[in-house]
Amino acid sequence: MLGQDLVARLRSRHTVIPFTRADADITDAEGITAAIKRASPDALIHAAAFTGVDRCESERDLAFRVNGEGTRNVALACRELRIALLYLSTDYVFDGEKKEPYTETDAPHPLNVYGESKLEGEAQVERLLERYWVVRTSWLFGPLGRNFVESILGQARRGATLRVVNDQTGSPTYTEDLAAGLEAILERGGPGVYHLSNQGFCSWFEFSQEILRQVGLDPATVIPIPTSEVGRAARRPKNSRLANRYLATEGIPPLAPWQDALRRYLLRTTEIAK
Ligand SMILES: NC(=O)c1ccc[n+]([C@@H]2O[C@H](COP(=O)([O-])OP(=O)(O)OC[C@H]3O[C@@H](n4cnc5c(N)ncnc54)[C@H](OP(=O)(O)O)[C@@H]3O)[C@@H](O)[C@H]2O)c1
């Protein structure tokens, strides 16, 4: 989902060489090194991942092979070729027990296999490289992939009763805005860990209500439910809020409020649909 918006954003000021899984499978150490060598970039953005959070529970080995060892392969190639690496990570490295938003220095403690495997990816990057950025983001939505916004709109338009969890809080983050923030970190941010999400927080229930409100549907049709009623394979943190503290210390402006990002997303997808 993120990759395509990232390429579109970076292309205006940089030479970009996009990779798909067919170009470079990160679980193939030799193949990924050869692909990176051929491209020979100044910096590499690693956004590839096994992102099926519930599937990771039953496919633990695959999760670690892709998100842990795969990231190690990428980091080793970057070390050998002296290339700076930006690795995308997740709010799910935290257990959600903190009462305040998580800062970059809070200790991770994942609740699920996806979070564990992404944290292993972070550890590999930090262990192997000096020129790296680890950027944790949350609750992505964008026009080019599986998407919570479209799922809510689809269900609402079919007249389905929407029951949405109200005890997980985070920041919905628009891939276009995230891409702009990543570009700023690449261009001006010192190495290290960053939190990067659209501003403001909500629950999935509140996010759903705002989606309906913005397209002129009735937000009162959404029913709030607790996570315990959903029965998903992976546990999720109650608190996924990320304080984007290091963005400010690097002099990079914060991303827009999530409601504003949603408005621009809906305008863009309406244009695409025309
Ligand atoms: N989505 C979110 O809400 C969210 C939240 C926080 C952080 N993140 C992180 O942000 C990044 C981008 O997320 P996203 O939602 O854009 O993910 P996505 O839509 O699931 O895309 C992941 C990409 O990785 C590729 N991939 C999977 N296994 C691979 C392998 N072995 N070798 C090479 N490529 C492989 C996938 O290819 P195929 O299409 O061929 O499978 C896909 O193109 C990820 O690092 C994710 O962990 C996402």
Image (tube, rainbow, N blue to C red):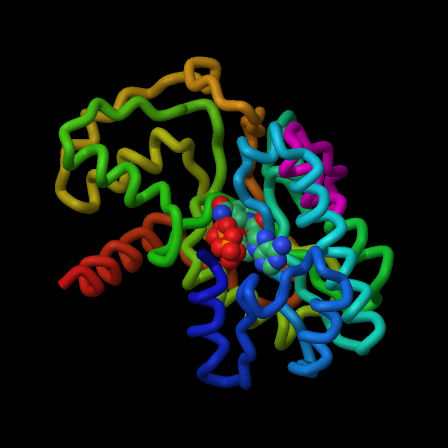
Which image quadrant for residue 63? top right
Residue 162: % across, % down? 26, 25
Residue 123: % across, % down? 80, 49
Asked if residue 119 lies left or right of residue 129, the reply is: left
Asked if residue 68 lies left or right of residue 15, the reply is: right
Residue 271: % across, % down? 19, 64
Quick check: 191 above or below 88?
A: below
Residue 26: % across, % down? 67, 59
**Residue closest to the eye, 242 or 59:** 59
Question: In the image, which residues are magenta?
Answer: 105-120
Furthest-top residue in view? 229
Asked if residue 226 lies left or right of residue 48, the reply is: left
Residue plotted at (70% across, 56% down) = 27
Quick check: 163 above or below 35?
A: above
Q: Quadrant of the C terminus?
A: bottom left
Quick check: 259 above or below 246?
A: above
Residue plotted at (49% across, 63% down) = 3
> So how many labels did they put on this image?
0
Residue plotted at (27% across, 39% down) = 210
Residue plotted at (43% across, 45% down) = 172
Quick check: 217 above or below 86?
A: above
Residue 84 visible (yes or no):
yes
